[in-house]
Image (cartoon, rainbow, N blue to C red):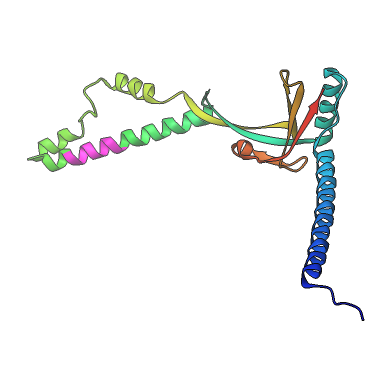
C-alpha cells in the first residue's frame, strides 16, 4: 500500500513550482522589456555623421525637403502729394461759398441790430473783415491747402522654411525643428510667433 505524501512535502512541491513559475515570468518580462527598450532607442537615436560638413549637408537637405510657407505683412505709409487742378478748383469754390455765407450772416445780423433805415442801408457796405478786399482774398487763398496726405498700403509676402536648424559646436550636433504648418500655407505676420513645433531632430557628428 502506497503511503500518502505528507502535507509538508506537498507544500514544498507547490512552493517550488510557484517560485520557478515566477522566475520564468520575470525572465520573459525582462526580455520583452529589453527588446522594447532597444527598439525605442533604435528609433530615437539618430545616425552619426563622420564630420561636421556631412551633418550640415544632411540637415540642409532635410530643411529643403520640408518645403516653405508664406508670411504676409501689411505696411501703411503716409505721404504728401500735390493737389490736382480739379481738387484745387473744388477747394476754391468751397472757400467762396463759405465767404458768401459769412457775408450773408453778417448782413442779417447787421439788419437785426440796425435802429433805422439809414443804418440798414449802411449794412450793405459792411466789410467782412478789417482787411482790404484784395488782401482779404489773398488771405483766403493762402488758407487753401496745396497738398494732401494719402495712405499707401503695401502687402509684403515673405517665404520661410518650415524647418530650421541651429549648430551647437560644443556638443557636436545640429538641433533642428519643424513648425506645425502645412507646406505653401499663407499666414499673417501676427500669427508667426504663435506657431507650434511639430518635430524635433538632431544631426550628430
Q: Judge from the rendering whether residue 180 lies leftward or rightward of residue 31; answer left or right.
A: left
Occupied quadrant, residue 42: top right
Q: Which residue lies at the image location 17% right of the left edge and 35% below the top edge?
A: 123
Q: What kind of secondary structure does the magenta stretch mostly adopt?
A: helix
In the image, residue 4 sits, relative to residue 171, either above or below, namely below
Q: Does the magenta stretch include residue 104?
A: yes
The number of numbered badges drawn on the structure is 0
Q: In the displayed orientation, state which residue is furthest to the front.
A: 1
Horizontally, residue 10 falls left or right of residue 127, namely right
Q: Is residue 161 visible?
A: no
Q: Position of residue 18 (x, y in %)?
A: 80, 63
Indicate whether residue 189 is drawn in magenta.
Answer: no
The structure residue drawn at horizontal position 85% and vertical position 46%, both measured from the top left corner, is 35
> Where residue 104 appears, x then y in whole percent?
26, 39
Q: Which residue is drawn at 61% across and 39% down?
A: 194
Q: Name the residue furthest left.
A: 115
**From the image, which quarter does the N terminus lie in?**
bottom right
Q: Quadrant of residue 113?
A: top left
How far from the left and from the top, in percent, is residue 55?
Answer: 83, 23
Nearest the eye: 58 or 138: 58
Residue at x 83%, y 63% (from the top left corner): 17
Magenta segment boundaries in residue numbering: 101-109
For the C terminus, the quadrant is top right
- In the image, residue 112 lies at what x, y percent? 14, 43
Give the residue furthest to the right. 1
Q: Residue 78 versus residue 103: which sits nearer the camera?
A: 78
Amino acid at each position: 500500500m502506497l503511503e500518502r505524501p505528507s502535507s509538508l512535502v506537498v507544500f514544498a512541491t507547490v512552493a517550488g513550482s510557484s517560485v520557478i513559475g515566477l522566475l520564468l515570468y520575470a525572465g520573459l518580462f525582462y526580455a520583452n522589456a529589453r527588446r522594447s527598450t532597444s527598439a525605442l532607442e533604435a528609433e530615437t537615436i539618430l545616425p552619426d555623421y563622420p564630420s561636421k560638413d556631412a551633418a550640415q549637408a544632411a540637415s540642409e537637405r532635410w530643411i529643403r525637403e520640408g518645403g516653405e510657407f508664406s508670411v504676409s505683412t501689411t505696411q501703411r505709409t503716409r505721404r504728401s502729394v500735390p493737389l490736382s487742378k480739379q481738387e484745387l478748383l473744388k477747394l476754391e469754390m468751397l472757400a467762396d461759398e463759405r465767404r458768401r455765407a459769412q457775408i450773408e450772416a453778417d448782413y442779417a445780423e447787421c439788419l437785426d441790430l440796425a435802429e433805422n433805415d439809414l443804418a440798414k442801408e449802411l449794412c450793405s457796405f459792411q466789410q467782412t473783415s478789417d482787411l482790404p478786399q484784395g488782401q482779404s482774398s489773398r488771405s483766403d487763398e493762402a488758407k487753401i491747402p496745396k497738398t494732401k496726405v494719402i495712405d499707401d498700403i503695401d502687402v509684403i509676402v515673405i517665404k520661410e522654411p518650415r524647418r530650421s536648424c541651429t549648430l551647437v559646436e560644443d556638443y557636436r550636433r545640429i538641433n533642428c525643428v519643424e513648425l506645425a504648418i502645412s507646406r505653401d500655407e499663407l499666414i499673417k505676420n501676427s500669427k508667426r510667433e504663435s506657431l507650434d513645433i511639430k518635430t524635433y531632430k538632431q544631426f550628430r557628428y
